[in-house]
Amino acid sequence: MGERVWDVIVIGAGPAGSALARRLASQARVCVLERAPAGVRAGPREPVHAGAPARAHTSVPAYAHARASECEASGDDDADAQTHRPPWRIGESLPGAAAVLLRRLGVLERFLADGHAERGASVSTWDSETPVWFDPLRDPNGPGWHLDRVRFDAMLRTAAEESGAAFAPLDGAWRVAHEGGAWQVDDVAGGQTHRARVLVDATGRSAALCRALDLPRERGDRLICLSLRLPPDPADLDRCTRTSADADGWWYSVRLPSGERVLALHLDADDPALRGLRDADALLAQARRLPLLADVLPSPDACAAFDLAVDVHPAGSAALDFDACFRHPGLFAVGDAALAFDPLSSQGLFQALASAESAAAAIARHLDGDAGAAGGYFAEMAQVRDRYRAHLAATYAGPVRHAERRFWARRRVAVPKQLSVSPAALVR
């Protein structure tokens, strides 16, 4: 195998991984390892940017194994729920407060030039059947954006490359081990070995690297998302984010920047209705029962001409055991790999950027010899986790009219009165 030596290896090239690489590349040798495109298999190659001179390969004992297919958010840790990753991403948005993070990354101007759609009002039927509105003009940070994710991810990757970060593919199986004060990642099929003092899991909700290292991960629940992407309708001018509590789950719908409309139902993985609702017509029929959704969904006749397919994927919250992570010197995790949010929070991408900023500062201190840098970072992530869980529990406590239904009873916990939250304020 050829070998490259870096200061930092990031596994995963999504928003968190690219944002982290962008921040670190000006002061450290950074390589981002990403899954090779489907159907592409390359032999040994150089990364985009050369690192330190190659040296002889060192045999590594006790490898942890993983597959490159796990190197992105896939939710395959819920395989027993017979789920799969959708070929597109629903409802991705950023709050106005993200402008501060984008400015610090030095990408705000190009982000604004990319034409992402400004978010409209949020409206929900949650605590009661009466719609509650939240006007984004009330948010001092501005309304935020609904994203074109392909464009957004490409922008962050380009920015990271411009800063000097290397991007290299993982072709198939990969192996990771720690020895001699350094991490080693072997791309088995590609014939390349990468070594660095710091290794970062940015593989998304699957947390593929941390799972390969047998690090414990706590799942909040077995929430499943069933989603449809409906074709553009010239008559659909609604820009609101619509959220509605139902007897056995909750719904979400919004018009995307492409003009298409997403419809999503979140329910328990063991709900007996799950199988039948995998049918697009059945899912739409259930949604049309709710006035808040019926107002914006196309008629059955309008849908008949399209071959609509329901995508199914895990959506529950999850968090790494941060104390266990700290026991692995030089190991960090960012974005969903560290802390995956329930989609009700609408904060996943913001957390990806924010955790990348915090991790970049901690990694820089670690490389300078600060032995407590990783501990400080994971302590911060634990505080974010605890605040998030408290506010999420308060939101799920809202629909008292469904309180005795299994979906809501499972999520009922003691919530301080001052934390009572409506999704009209939380999901925006």
Image: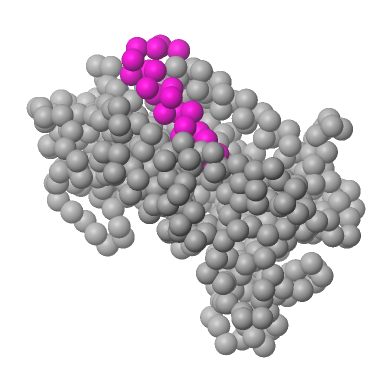
Magenta stretch: dominant secondary structure: helix
Frontmost residue, 11 versus 238: 238
**Res 399 visible:** yes
- Asked if residue 67 is among those painted magenta in the image, a careful observer would answer no
In the image, residue 346 sits, relative to residue 301, either above or below, namely: above
Which percent across, then down, holds residue 422? 80, 46
Residue at image coords 38%, 34%: 23
Screen quadrant of the N terminus: top left
Scheme by which the image is coloured: one colour
Residue positioned 57% across, 77% down in the render: 232
| Observer-nearest of 227 and 132 | 132
Judged left or right of residue 301, residue 205 is left
**Residue 218, position as x, y percentages in the image:** 58, 33
At 42% from the left edge and 41% from the top edge, which residue is drawn? 106
Q: How many marks?
A: 0
Q: Which residues are magenta?
A: 351-372
Q: Where is residue 315 shown, x and y percent of the image?
A: 60, 50
Q: Is residue 265 above or below residue 208?
A: below
Q: Quadrant of residue 359?
A: top left
The quarter holding residue 410 reads top right
257 left or right of 38? right
Vertical comparison of 330 with 54: above or below? above
**Residue 264 picture location, percent across and down:** 65, 62
